[in-house]
Each structure stands twice: as C-alpha cells, then as structure tokens.
Image (cartoon, helix red, strand yellow):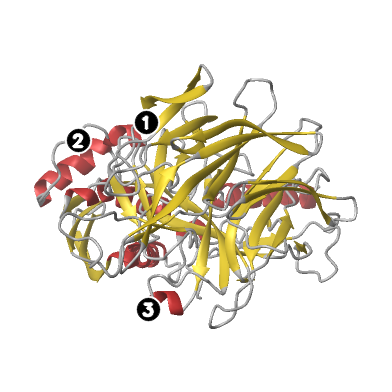
C-alpha cells in the first residue's frame, strides 16, 4: 500500500515538473520593434516599416519571445532621435519587456544602420553597421542572431529555428520537381519529392521534358485553349509567323497550323484574351510595320500594327488587323481578371506616354481609361503582384533591373541582378533634333520577357516567375543579347526587395518566353520554357528553338515553403 502511495506522489511530482517546463508555464517575454527613422532620399522611405517587419519576424520565438500586437504601434509620435527617458516611457506604455528602435542612413549605394534596444532593467544597448544597400537583409539577420544569443544562449541560432520542447521540429516541404533548386536557410526544413508523382517522358531523371527542335528562332509564346476543345495549344511567334502546336500523348510536339504575315511586319509579343466574348480565347499579337530611314547610317522606324487571330478547326483567321497600337494582356486588381491594354507609338521615342485599357467599338479599337502606373511602365514591362494587402507593381526597366512600386506608384526597390534578357530589340530614338544621319549609335529598347505572378500553395503570398539571363559577354557589350544560359527564378516581396524562393537549374540557350499551365494536357501544371538555341560564340549559326517543361507536383503542397532563405551562390 505504501509503495502505491509513493508511486502516486512520484507521478504527481513528475507531472508537475513537466507542466512547469511546458510553454504554458515558462516565462514568455514580449517585445516591440518600432518603425525605423530613415535618413536619405524619399524613395527609401519604405524601409521604415520594412526593417521593422524583418526584425520582428526574425526575433519572434513562439511561446518564448513574442511581439506586441501591431495595432498597438499605430499612430505613435515621431520616433526620430528617441531619447532614453522617452524610450522608457514608451516601453512602459506598450507593456513589453524589450523595446527595439533605430535608424538607417542611406548614402548612395551604402547605408549605416543603428539598432538600439532597452531591456527590463532600462539599460540601452546599441548595435551599428555600415554596409552596402544589398547587404541589409544579412545585417539584420546578424543583429537578430546576436540578440538571440545574448538573451537566450542559442549559440547564434535564430529564435525561429531554436530547439523547442527539447528538440528541433522538421518542416517538410514539397520541392515540386527535381529540376528546381530551393533557396534554403532554415536547416530544420526538409525538402522532399513525392515518390508517387511520376514525371512522364523524363528518362533522364532531371525533372524536365524536352521537345524536338523547331526549325525557327522564336520571339514569344502563349499557352491557351484557342479552339475551346478543352485541350491546350502552344502558340509561338517568330518575326513574321504564328505557329500553333500541341503535345500528343507521347509528349511529342506536333505542328497544327501557321499564319504568315508580310516580311515588312515584325511580331513582338503574343498573348491570349477573349476579345469577342464568345467564351474562347483569341490570339493577341503585338507587331510593328518596319521601315528604314537615314542615308549614311540607316536605322529602323516603326508603325504599330498589331492584330488578333481566331484559331478554329486547325486554322487561323484574322479577326482584327492593323491595330495602330502596341497591345498586350494583363491581370488587373482588384479582381485580377485579364484585361486588354494598349499604348500609342511615340514620335521621338518608341512609346508614347501612358498605358490604357483598350475598348472595341464598331470593328476598331480605341484607347479607354488610362491605368495608374509609374512613368517607367509601358504596355510590355509591368505586372501587378498581389499582396496580403493591396498589390505591388513590378516593372522591368531599360537596364533589365526589376523595380518594385507601391499601388500608388512609389518606388520601393530596384534589383541588383538583371532579369528578363529579351533579344527582341527595337530602335528607341528617332531623329533627335539637329542630328540625323550623323548619329552612329541609337538607343535600343529590348521588349521584356513575360513575368508571371502565381500562387501554387494557396497561402497569402504570391510569387513572381521571371527569367534571369546568364552571360559574361552581355556585361561588356550592351547589345549582345544571345544569352548562352538562363534560369527561371521564383521571387517574392520580403518587405525590402524581391527575394529568391526557388529557381531552375541552368538552362542552355536564350530563354524566349515562359508559361505556367498544363502544357501537355495531362492534368498537371507545368513550368514551360521556350528556348532559342545558342548560335555559337560568334553568333553565326542558324538559330533554332525548343520547348522545355517541368511538371510541378502541387498535390502535397502544405504552405511550409520558408520565406527566410539564404542567398544562393552563383
């Protein structure tokens, strides 16, 4: 009897000790990160909340170190030069154990960052760093690790990754395809491939399927059900032709039909949109009529001459011809439904000011309402990237850098890497005043490749698919556009810039376009990449093209793809 009583007492003591060690009984510290004071050009004002968000995310440790509710930080007085006594009052007002605040001073491509913290005893500690602008994220990561280590002896490990309950929990994330390289920082994340998912037609195990070679160089591609039969066709343009193709059941790419225009016209870009409201998509082709000017140094000039085709019964027919605008299709917020947009040609430059919704009336198209866009945007170079609240506008500028703007047109970031990498170049400067034939080198504009906003895992964060061209020669020769390699990158907005989620392995050749669709009609979403074969070092070989596609296993997506990834080394 005594032994039973002793056992019950021991069991009670053990249970009590376990409760004390559980998160519910452990002490939970709270903290607040205030908006940072930003000293520098107004275009960097977004860093005030951007740095605040990044530090909050990196300092948070569930049940251990928890951020105050964001609503309590609204409508705070000016925090610039926050004095020690004011900081103590604010800390008490917010009811937190730790308070963090600071400033960022931008000087060209460099910045100095000062981070101050106040703990329970009221002592202030300062951490400072002077870094390049593109090293901001890593610096904040280092700061958070130093704080983690000082407060919780985690050995520099990020709180979000620190052991909880005596062990490290593994997050399992579906890698979707063996041909994708995920940018990973959290060592507790396990990327896996579904063993039940089969990559039909992939004999190499690389996760991608390669079409036969097409006997022409390609300018652009769109994947759409053009004839309404429930099967996707692939529409590809070269300079003066439109081709319809489809994969058969053996994943062989079969030609279906073609449409040829006069060689005096040049196709620039292709898209799909239901123009006449019959429930079936028409083929939208942006094109120009090309003529030349000049005597000693001739150059091209253009008249916008776009057209729209119907595809039915394996044949093309012209629905609208010689539309005097550059035209395209974009998914527009808030409904993110596709809309047909257009832009006039310019008199001194390639594009006139403003991008407009197109309106069809009486068999012709007119410019309708103007879109609210940054001045750098044109009909080909922007997309709307959905966010949890509102959206970003992403623009490819003339230097092939990604610029990110708020929904009101305020620039927030510009990438260091180049993206897009199109080979479709058009003269962008016509007869400057006082200079005609003597101008030896006129500006060229390279029509950007397609960017695709997407969200495969159904969370509140959208990603952006974009091409990253790889070439040493293009770094030295502005007009060298025969990129020997490329990578498709999936990027997301991290509060400061566009950061990498995953990318394809290197693709040999110049990427001409990309798509995200069931390209071979097997019920599986594919990442499709149109590639022009590299013409050789001297660019003398005849260019041909092919299509690669990566089947994406989305059946087991669980939304655990990490947002805090280490920068991948090239």
Q: Position of residue 360 (x, y in %)?
A: 50, 21
Judge whether residue 33 can be spotted in this image. Answer: no
Tell me, yes or no, whether the two marked residues, 3 and 2, touch with CB atoms within 8 Å: no
Q: If you read the primary sequence from the N terminus, does the residue marked by circle 3 or circle 1 appear first?
A: 1
Total marks in image: 3
Q: Nearer the viewer, mark 2 or mark 1?
A: 1
Q: Secondary structure at mark 2?
A: loop
How far apart in space, not on screen, are marks 2 and 1 (Cα)?
34 Å
Q: Secondary structure at mark 3?
A: helix
Q: Is residue 430 left or right of residue 18?
A: left
Q: Position of residue 487 (x, y in %)?
A: 57, 66
Q: How busy is the neighbourhood of tag 2: few (under 14 within 10 Å), some, or many (20 plus)?
A: few
Label placed on residue 307: none
Which residue carries the number 2 mark?
76
Which residue carries the number 3 mark?
476
Residue drawn at x 28%, y 70% is 440
Which residue carries the number 1 mark?
371
């Amino acid at each position: 009897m005594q032994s039973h009583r002793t056992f019950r007492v021991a069991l009670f003591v053990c249970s009590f000790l376990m409760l004390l060690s559980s998160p519910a009984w452990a002490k939970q510290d709270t903290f607040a990160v205030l908006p940072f004071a930003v000293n520098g050009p107004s275009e960097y004002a977004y860093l005030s909340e951007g740095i605040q968000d990044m530090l909050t995310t990196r300092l948070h440790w569930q049940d251990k170190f928890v951020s105050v509710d964001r609503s309590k930080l609204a409508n705070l007085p000016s925090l610039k030069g926050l004095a020690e006594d004011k900081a103590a009052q604010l800390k008490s007002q917010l009811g937190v154990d730790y308070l963090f605040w600071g400033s960022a001073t931008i000087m060209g491509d460099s910045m100095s960052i000062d981070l101050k913290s106040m703990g329970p005893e009221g002592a202030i500690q300062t951490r400072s760093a002077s870094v390049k602008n593109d090293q901001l994220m890593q610096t904040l990561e280092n700061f958070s690790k130093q704080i983690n280590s000082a407060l919780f002896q985690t050995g520099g490990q990020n709180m979000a990754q620190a052991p909880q309950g005596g062990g490290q929990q593994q997050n399992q994330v579906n890698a979707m395809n063996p041909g994708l390289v995920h940018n990973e920082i959290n060592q507790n994340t396990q990327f896996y491939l579904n063993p039940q998912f089969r990559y039909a037609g992939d004999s190499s195990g690389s996760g991608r399927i390669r079409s036969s070679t097409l006997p022409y160089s390609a300018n652009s591609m769109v994947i759409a059900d053009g004839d309404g039969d429930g099967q996707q066709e692939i529409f590809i343009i070269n300079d003066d032709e439109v081709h319809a193709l489809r994969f058969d059941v053996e994943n062989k790419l079969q030609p279906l039909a073609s449409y040829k225009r006069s060689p005096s016209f040049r196709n620039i870009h292709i898209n799909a949109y239901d123009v006449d409201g019959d429930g079936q998509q028409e083929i939208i082709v942006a094109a120009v009529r090309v003529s030349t000017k000049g005597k000693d140094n001739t150059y091209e000039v253009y008249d916008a001459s776009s057209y729209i085709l119907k595809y039915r019964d394996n044949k093309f027919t012209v629905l609208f011809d010689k539309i005097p605008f550059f035209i395209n299709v974009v998914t527009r917020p808030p409904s993110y439904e596709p809309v047909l947009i257009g832009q006039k040609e310019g008199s001194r430059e390639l594009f006139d000011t403003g991008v407009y919704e197109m309106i069809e009336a009486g068999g012709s198209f007119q410019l309708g309402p103007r879109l609210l866009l940054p001045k750098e945007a044109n009909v080909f170079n922007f997309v709307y990237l959905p966010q949890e609240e509102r959206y970003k506008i992403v623009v490819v500028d003339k230097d092939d850098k990604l610029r990110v703007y708020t929904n009101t047109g305020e620039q927030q970031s510009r990438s260091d890497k180049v993206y897009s990498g199109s080979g479709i170049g058009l003269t962008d400067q016509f007869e400057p005043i006082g200079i005609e034939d003597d101008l030896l080198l006129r500006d060229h504009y390279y029509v950007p490749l397609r960017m695709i906003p997407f969200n495969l895992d159904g969370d509140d964060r959208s990603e952006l698919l974009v091409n990253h061209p790889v070439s040493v020669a293009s770094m030295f020769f502005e007009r060298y556009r025969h990129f020997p390699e490329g990578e498709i990158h999936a990027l997301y907005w991290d509060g400061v810039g566009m950061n990498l989620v995953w990318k394809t392995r290197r693709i040999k050749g110049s990427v001409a376009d990309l798509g995200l669709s069931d390209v071979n009609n097997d019920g599986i979403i594919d990442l499709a990449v149109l590639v022009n074969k590299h013409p050789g070092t001297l660019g003398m070989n005849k260019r041909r093209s092919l299509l690669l596609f990566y089947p994406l296993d989305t059946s087991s997506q669980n939304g655990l793809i990490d947002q805090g990834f280490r920068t991948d080394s090239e």
